[in-house]
Amino acid sequence: MLGALDTFRAQQEAADGVHARLTEISELLSQLRKQVGALAANDELRAILQQEQSCLERAQRMVAEVRVWREQ
């Protein structure tokens, strides 16, 4: 009977450990959601990203034009 009780206690400890870890992960995810929300709402960051996108689009057009020029 002692073996079964030890097994139960070990399983309970393992379950408690898993629960503690899941609670920690849940808290970390909550913090991450808040940070992502703050970044998404940041107008300055959004403007910078739009500028970067514009620069990349211009670079893509320039590369395409250079390819056409080289082929000719």
Image (cartoon, rainbow, N blue to C red):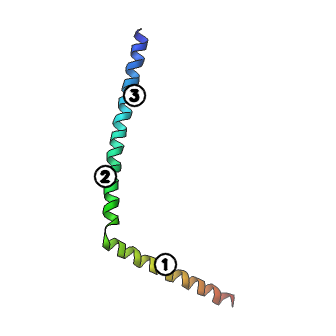
Q: Is the residue under label 3 in contact with that under label 2 (CB below 8 Å)?
A: no
Q: Is the residue under label 3 in contact with that under label 1 (CB below 8 Å)?
A: no
Q: Secondary structure at mark 1?
A: helix
Instruction: Pinpoint residue 53: horizontal percent, then vertical percent.
Output: 45, 76
In which quadrant of the rendered view does residue 8 lie? top left
Query: Counting residues from the N terminus, which is met first, the one under dot 2 or under dot 3?
Result: 3
Q: Is the residue under label 1 in contact with that under label 2 (CB below 8 Å)?
A: no
In which quadrant of the rendered view does residue 66 lie? bottom right
Q: CA distance from mark 2 to mark 1?
A: 32 Å
Residue type highlighted by circle 2: Gln
Residue type highlighted by circle 3: Ala
Query: Counting residues from the N terminus, which is met first, the one under dot 1 or under dot 3?
Result: 3
Q: Secondary structure at mark 3?
A: helix
Mark 2 vs mark 1, foreground winner is: 2
Q: Which of these two is toward me, 34 or 51?
A: 34
Mark 2, residue position: 31
In the displayed structure, does residue 3 sit left or right of residue 28?
right
In the displayed structure, does residue 51 sit left or right of residue 34?
right
Q: Answer above or below: position of 42 versus 26.
A: below
User: Which residue shows up at 31% across the image and 46% down it?
Assistant: 27
Q: CA distance from mark 1 to mark 3?
A: 51 Å
User: Which residue shows up at 36% across the image and 72% down it?
Assistant: 46
Mark 1, residue position: 56
Instruction: Pinpoint residue 39: horizontal percent, then vertical percent.
Output: 33, 64
Q: Answer above or below: position of 27 versus 11.
A: below
